[in-house]
Every structure is written in structure tokens, then in C-alpha cells.
Amino acid sequence: MIRKRSIKLMTVLGVLVVAASFSRPPRAVRAAGEAPSGRVITRLVGQHRAITISSTSNGVRYSVDVDGKTILANATLDELRLRHPESFRQIQSSIAHSSPQSWAGVDMIDADR
């Protein structure tokens, strides 16, 4: 009885050791591609996509990596909107705009008083 349990335990441990030896190394988050020029403002990393927003001498630029491959590099916001609309929609709500309306429901005339 004890011998059967020992054999079962050794078999299970052996299977676990063999299975652990076949594990894959972790995938790199960013592949060696074209590095964004300028200073990186932020990097939004999702499960399959990473968007890098950087500040250059020509203004803000956007780069998109999908599954570790750069598919759009150093693009303007309009180029991002046209070439990769899904990424544009992802960051659209977080872009600050100058607008005459400071807050919803507050009139600018009242704000000057």
C-alpha cells in the first residue's frame, strides 16, 4: 500500500519536473524596432498593443507596437487616426484639449465673475 503511494508520488513529481523543463521563456514586451525619437511622455501597454507618446522638436508623436512589432512609428495624431483608428480611439479620451468650456454645466461668462 505504502509502496504504491510512493510510486504514484514519484510518478507525479517526475511528470511535474518534465513539464516544468518545457516551459517557454517570457515574451519580450518591446521588440528591438525603431526607437521613438525625442523624450517619451508616456507608454500605454495593453495585452497585445503598446502605444508610445513622445515629445519631439516637431511636436507630439505616436508609435504603435502590436504583439512586439512596430506597425506605426513617429506619427502625428492625424496619421494615427487615419492609419490605426483603434489605437486612436484608445487614447482619444485621454488627450487634453484647450476649449472655451472649462467644465460641463459651467458657463464661461459666470466663471469670469
Image (cartoon, rainbow, N blue to C red):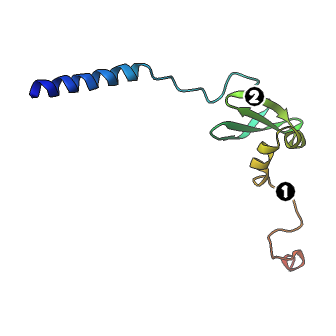
Q: Which corner quadrant holds the C terminus?
A: bottom right
Q: Position of residue 61 (x, y in %)?
A: 83, 38
Q: Position of residue 98 (x, y in %)?
A: 87, 59
Res. 21 visible in picture: yes
Q: Position of residue 7 (x, y in %)?
A: 18, 22
Q: Position of residue 43 (x, y in %)?
A: 69, 39
| Residue positioned most to the left | 1
Q: Which mark is on residue 97? A: 1
The CA span between labels 1 and 2 is 27 Å
Q: Amino acid at mark 2?
A: Thr
Q: Residues within 10 Å of mark 2 (few under 14, many from 20)?
A: some
Q: 43 or 37: nearer the eye? A: 43
Q: Secondary structure at mark 2?
A: strand
Q: Amino acid at mark 1?
A: His
The quadrant holding residue 35 is top right
Q: 75 or 107: nearer the eye? A: 75
Q: 3 or 44: nearer the eye? A: 3
Residue 58 appears left or right of 45: right
Q: 67 or 43: nearer the eye? A: 67
Q: Secondary structure at mark 1?
A: loop
Residue 39 appears left or right of 11: right
Q: Residue at x 51, y 23 (%)?
A: 25
Q: How many marks?
A: 2
The quadrant holding residue 78 is top right
Q: Which mark is on residue 45? A: none
Q: Residue at x 14, y 25 (%)?
A: 4
According to the image, label 2 marks what residue? Answer: 70
